[in-house]
Amino acid sequence: MQRVTLRLPEQQLKMIDMLVEYGEFPSASEAIRTAIRDLIDQRSEKLVGRIKLFEKTQEQSKNADSYLRLKDEQ
């Protein structure tokens, strides 16, 4: 595991410390790792959706091009 240094507003740090204090997480590091995992999961789902939409649009564009070429040949 690699170490990453980041700056957070004091209010966010206090909230993380409170979550640790009340037993939600064993440490601040684990709370932050969980938040990052959740972020990656959420963003990955959105990204997959965008990729599928892009692929569908490309396929529709190819179909339209093929249709137009056929009409021109007639």
Image: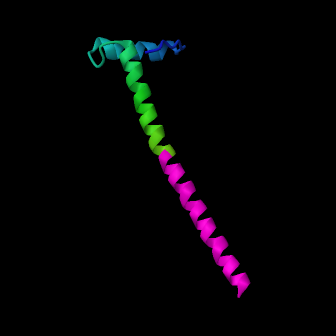
**In the displayed image of the protein, which residue is found farthest to the front?**
73
Q: Is residue 60 magenta?
A: yes
Relative depth, front residue between 26 and 71: 71
Q: Is residue 11 magenta?
A: no
Relative depth, front residue between 14 and 31: 31
Q: How is the image coloured?
A: rainbow
Image coordinates of residue 29 in percent, x first then y, are 39, 14
Image coordinates of residue 57 in percent, x first then y, are 58, 61
**In the displayed image of the protein, which residue is found farthest to the right?**
72
Q: Total of numbered circles in the picture?
A: 0
Task: Please say if 59 is above or below 66.
Answer: above
Q: Magenta stretch: give its range.
A: 48-74
Q: Identify the residue shown where x is 40% and y is 17%.
A: 15
Left or right: residue 22 compared with residue 63:
left
Image coordinates of residue 21 in percent, x first then y, are 30, 11
In the rendered image, the quadrant that contains the N terminus is top left
Left or right: residue 18 compared with residue 71:
left
Q: Identify the residue shown where x is 30% and y is 17%.
A: 25
Relative depth, front residue between 51 and 24: 51
In the rendered image, the quadrant that contains the C terminus is bottom right
Q: Identify the residue shown where x is 48% and y is 50%.
A: 49
Task: Please say if 41 is above or below 9.
Answer: below
**In the displayed image of the protein, which residue is found farthest to the left?**
23
Task: Please say if 30 is above or below 69.
Answer: above
Q: Identify the residue shown where x is 47% and y is 14%.
A: 2
Chief secondary structure of the magenta portion? helix
